[in-house]
């Protein structure tokens, strides 16, 4: 018995706390008290990947804001994408309280009714689309700064940004419409409500796969044409190829979304689909942060070197002071003569004071421009490659 297909007047006379939200397969009994679910798996996956994503974003924001001091729109978009990913994890956690990740026959109809009336099951698409939109825009803005040295490349990047924005806004508009229209069991039979959970989800997954590969392929021709040593060229390419993880996740999400077409146990299948959703979102955000890692690691290396040097200098100073406290043979044999030779002398200025200050100043300036110089190197190589291709 599917409560969503029943007359509302009949539902009003039933005790929905004892009615399953969907019919179980033959030979299976509903289990309201101790049902099997994906609640634990969803929690673990969200915590691991969201925490990992937050770590990469923190490194990016620190590197761009405090080391290179070149905070831009791509960093703001990355921050919004990270916040959307965290919001998605919170929404999923809330949905599991209302049967998300459970078999429909193990969920009380009353629980599903409360969730539908509160629009809880339609809330996760908003942070999902926001995360992908701003994450991809952040990557495309980075590409425009590094590779937009020829009109053709610039047009491709701008076109990708416009298409991604228009597509995301259209999906978000449909999500808003379903959020407003689908507020009861009876509403779930409306074409929009049925399509939102099935066919629209499949179309959304297909376009996400296409845009993921589009964002991945844009920089590859320019990267391979850079006038850089082979090792560095491979390193730069590997950074962008990390986006393959997002592409693989979007393909997995598409395959999982196809299973929802005509499926009865949709709460369970969509929870399985959410594994790929979480991986796709966080992979996009992480990919947008990878180019800032070299700058951060150089700063960490400098910190480690400074700490080691200070510790070594401190140990050497302590050893010298200990040796200076030991009396010499002359002091032991004739202390009076030693005192006569000793004369008050003016304490010399520390010749290392200004040098140390100057070194620190120069070092901070050099570290502050590491990222910009690295980007300038890639951009210069891209410009030279573009000029060579134009001449040819």
Image (cartoon, rainbow, N blue to C red):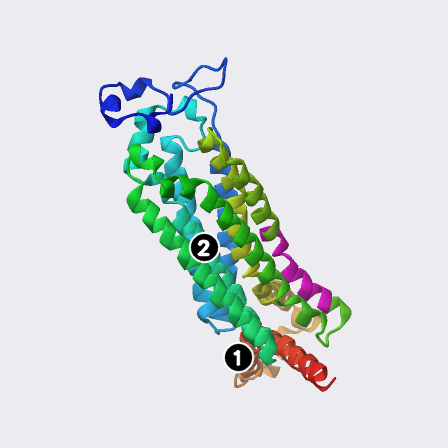
Q: Dot 2: few (<14), some (14–19), or many (≥20) neighbours within 10 Å?
A: many
Q: Quadrant of the N terminus?
A: top left
Seen in the image, is 264 located left or right of residue 4?
right
- In the image, which disc is placed on residue 131? 2
Residue 109 shows in the view:
yes
- N-term-proximal mark, 2 vs 1: 2
At x 28% / y 35%, what residue is drawn? 184
Which of these two is toward me, 98 or 292? 98
Residue 232, position in %: x, y? 72, 68
At x 54% / y 47%, what residue is drawn? 279
Residue 39 shows in the view:
no
At x 76% / y 72%, what residue is drawn? 229
Seen in the image, is 110 located left or right of residue 100?
left
Spatial CA distance of label 2 from label 1 is 39 Å
Residue carrying label 1: 361
Residue 199, position in %: x, y? 47, 43
Please check the rendered image and state whether residue 240 is part of the magenta-colored stretch, yes or no: yes
Question: What span is in magenta?
Answer: 233-246
Occupied quadrant, residue 236: bottom right
Occupied quadrant, residue 131: bottom left
């Amino acid at each position: 018995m599917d409560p969503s297909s029943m007359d509302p007047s009949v539902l009003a006379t039933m005790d929905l706390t004892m009615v399953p939200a969907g019919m179980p397969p033959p030979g299976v009994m509903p289990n309201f008290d101790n049902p099997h679910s994906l609640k634990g798996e969803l929690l673990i996956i969200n915590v691991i990947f969201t925490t990992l994503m937050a770590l990469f974003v923190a490194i990016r924001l620190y590197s761009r804001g405090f080391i290179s001091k070149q905070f831009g729109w791509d960093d703001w978009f990355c921050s919004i994408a990270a916040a959307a990913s965290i919001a998605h994890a919170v929404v999923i956690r809330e949905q599991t309280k209302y049967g998300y990740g459970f078999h429909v026959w193990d969920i009380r109809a009353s629980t599903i009714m409360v969730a539908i009336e509160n629009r809880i099951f339609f809330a996760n698409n908003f942070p999902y689309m926001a995360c992908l939109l701003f994450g991809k825009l952040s990557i495309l803005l980075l590409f425009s700064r590094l590779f937009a040295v020829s009109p053709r490349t610039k047009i491709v990047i701008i076109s990708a940004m416009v298409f991604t924005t228009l597509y995301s806004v259209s999906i978000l508009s449909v999500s808003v419409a379903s959020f407003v229209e689908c507020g009861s069991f009876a509403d779930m039979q409306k074409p929009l409500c049925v399509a939102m959970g099935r066919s629209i989800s499949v179309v959304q997954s297909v376009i996400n796969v296409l845009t993921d590969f589009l964002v991945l392929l844009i920089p590859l021709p320019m990267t391979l044409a850079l006038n850089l040593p082979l090792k560095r060229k491979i390193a730069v390419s590997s950074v962008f190829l990390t986006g393959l993880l997002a592409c693989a996740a979007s393909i997995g999400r598409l395959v999982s979304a196809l299973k929802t077409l005509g499926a009865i146990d949709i709460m369970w299948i969509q929870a399985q689909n959410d594994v790929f959703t979480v991986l796709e979102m966080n992979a996009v955000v992480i990919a947008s942060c990878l180019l800032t890692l070299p700058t951060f690691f150089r700063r960490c290396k400098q910190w480690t070197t400074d700490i080691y040097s200070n510790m070594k200098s401190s140990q050497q100073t302590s050893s010298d002071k200990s040796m200076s406290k030991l009396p010499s043979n002359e002091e032991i044999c004739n202390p009076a003569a030693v005192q006569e030779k000793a004369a008050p002398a003016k304490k010399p200025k520390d010749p290392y004071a200004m040098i140390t200050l100057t070194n620190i100043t120069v070092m901070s300036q050099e570290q502050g421009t590491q990222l910009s110089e690295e980007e300038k190197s890639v951009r210069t190589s891209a410009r030279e490659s573009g000029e060579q291709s134009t001449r040819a």
